[in-house]
Image (cartoon, grey):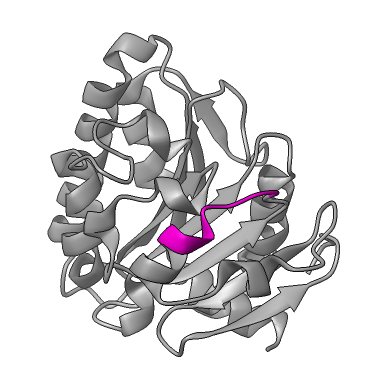
Amino acid sequence: MTSRELIEKAFLPTPDSPYSLGTAIAARSGSGKTTLIRGLVMPTVKWKEWKNVRFVYISMKGDTAFPEGEFHGDVGEAIQSIAKNKFTTFAPQEMGDAEGEIDILIEEVFHMARANAGKKERPLFVIIVDDANVLKGFNSTGRPSSSVMKLAVAGRSMGIRPVFIVHRAANLPRLLNGQLSSLIVMNMGEMDSEYFRKIFGMDLDAITEGLGDFRWAFVDLIEEDFTKFAPIKPL
C-alpha cells in the first residue's frame, strides 16, 4: 500500500463509497497520534483531488493539530473558519458545555454540505474528534450522542468523513460496528483483544505484535486485512 492509498482509505471523504465510512484511531496519550495525523493529512494540501477537502480538528486538550490553519475556542468563530479555510481547530473552552458546542458545530457542517450539494466544486469535510471518549455515550456499552451517530451514519452520503480518536479500541461504541471502514492502532500496550475479535472479527494481538514506540498499524475493515508501518515519518 502506498502512502497515497493509505491516506485515501483513512481520510478521503468520497460520497457513497464504502471507504467514506468512519475511521478510528486508537492510541494512548503521548503515543504520537497528533504527529501521525499531521503526517498523513498535510501532504494532501498539494494534491489536486483534495483541493475541496476541509479538515476540522476538535481538540479536547486545548492544543492544535494544524498550526497552519486557524485555532478557535468559540464555536461561532470556528464555524466561520470552516466555511473558508482548509484547516480549522476547535477547542471548547468549557468542558461542561463541550458536547453542546460540538453538536452545534457538526450540525453547521451538515448545513454547509447540504447547501453545496450538487455543486461540482462542493466542499468535502473530514471531522477529527480527539478525544471522542468525552462525548456522551462514546464507550463500549453506551449509546453515542445523536451528533456522533449522525456523523457515523449520515455523513457518508453528505461528503463528511468522521475520524474518532480513542485511547483503546475497546472503547469504541458497539453501535459503530459496521460504520467504520478503517482503524489505526498505535503504541497500545495491553488491549482487550477478546472484545476486538468479537466486534471486528480480527485478532488485535496479531496486528499489534512487535509494534514499538511510534509504530502503528492500519486495519482495512472493508477488505479485512492490515498493514504494519514503521516509526512515524512525513509521507
- Residue plotted at (58% across, 63% down): 184
- Residue plotted at (54% across, 55% down): 25
> In the rendered view, does 42 fall on the left or right side of 103?
right
188 inside magenta stretch: no
Q: Position of residue 154 (x, y in %)?
A: 16, 62
194 inside magenta stretch: yes
The residues colored magenta run 189-195
Work out whether residue 208 or residue 35 is closer to the camera in this orientation and state it. Answer: 208
Occupied quadrant, residue 114: bottom left
Is 216 rendered above or below residue 33?
Answer: below
Q: Position of residue 72 (x, y in %)?
A: 47, 23
Work out whether residue 19 or residue 180 is closer to the camera in this orientation and state it. Answer: 180
> In the rendered view, does 9 fall on the left or right side of 179?
right
Asked if residue 13 shows in the view, the reply is no
- Residue plotted at (71% across, 86% down): 2
> In the rendered view, does 74 fall on the left or right side of 86?
left
Quarter containing the C terminus: bottom right
Asked if residue 127 shows in the view, the reply is yes
Q: Position of residue 73 (x, y in %)?
A: 44, 18
Counting every numbered tag in the picture gives 0
Q: Position of residue 133 (x, y in %)?
A: 40, 35
